């Protein structure tokens, strides 16, 4: 993801081999044990400070308005939906033509503001994907879940929470 987020800057470099890592802080940490000549990582200034690395460039992100979201995770489910205004759900679509379109239509008809859709291949399953959907939670959140249920092979609410401060 970091490589994509810094695409414009990376296009200005020549003879560079890009290696995707699962975490930018881990990428910076991995440089500690290697000869850092001709090696670099995309990471925050905080990770550079923590791991004793030097910043080669600052603000290399393509979208200057991009931000990272952090969540506080708890084993206790937040059951008071009136105190939340956002949620994330996981779903696997049934392998039928038009199911994604039908799910998105149900979300819109229930006045849910869809903020993010991401699809990822499911390991070991050809042509099936799951979507991480984030939307503002309104009174009809549970109704919307019931309405999209028959279009999915699996659905799970990952969490309900308050929007963060920008």
Image (tube, helix red, strand yellow):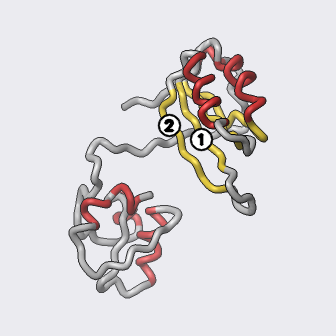
Quadrant where the C terminus is found in the figure: top left
Secondary structure at badge 1 equals strand
Q: Image point 24% across, 78% down: which residue?
A: 14
As displayed, is residue 12 above or below residue 164? below
Q: Residue furthest front?
A: 97
Left or right placement of residue 62 versus residue 148 in this view? left
Q: Measured from the top left, where is residue 157 in percent x and y?
A: 69, 33
Tell me, yes or no, whether the two marked residues, 1 and 2, touch with CB atoms within 8 Å. Answer: yes
Identify the residue position indicated by label 2 in the image.
Answer: 116
Q: Is 13 placed above or below 124 here?
A: below
Residue 82 position in % (x across, y down): 61, 14
Secondary structure of the residue carrying numbered label 2: strand
Compare residues 19 and 50 and report the one nearer the observer. 19
Foreground pick, 31 / 16: 16
Q: Which mark is residue 43?
A: none
* Image: 49 above or below 18: above
- Choose top left, top right, bottom left or bottom right for residue 159: top right
Q: Which mark is residue 132?
A: 1
Q: Is residue 9 left or right of residue 119?
A: left
């Amino acid at each position: 993801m970091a490589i994509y987020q810094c695409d414009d800057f990376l296009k200005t470099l020549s003879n560079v081999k890009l290696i995707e890592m699962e975490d930018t802080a881990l990428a910076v940490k991995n440089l500690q044990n290697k000869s850092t000549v001709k090696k670099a990582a995309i990471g925050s200034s905080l990770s550079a400070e923590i791991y004793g690395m030097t910043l080669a460039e600052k603000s290399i992100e393509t979208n200057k308005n991009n931000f990272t979201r952090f969540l506080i995770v708890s084993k206790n489910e937040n059951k008071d939906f009136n105190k939340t205004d956002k949620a994330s759900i996981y779903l696997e679509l049934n392998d039928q033509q038009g199911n994604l379109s039908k799910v998105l239509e149900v979300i819109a008809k229930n006045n849910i503001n869809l903020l993010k859709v991401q699809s990822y291949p499911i390991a070991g399953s050809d042509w099936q994907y799951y979507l991480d959907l984030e939307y503002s939670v309104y009174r009809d959140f549970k109704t919307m879940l019931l309405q999209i249920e028959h279009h999915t092979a699996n659905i799970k609410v990952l969490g309900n929470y308050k929007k963060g401060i920008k």
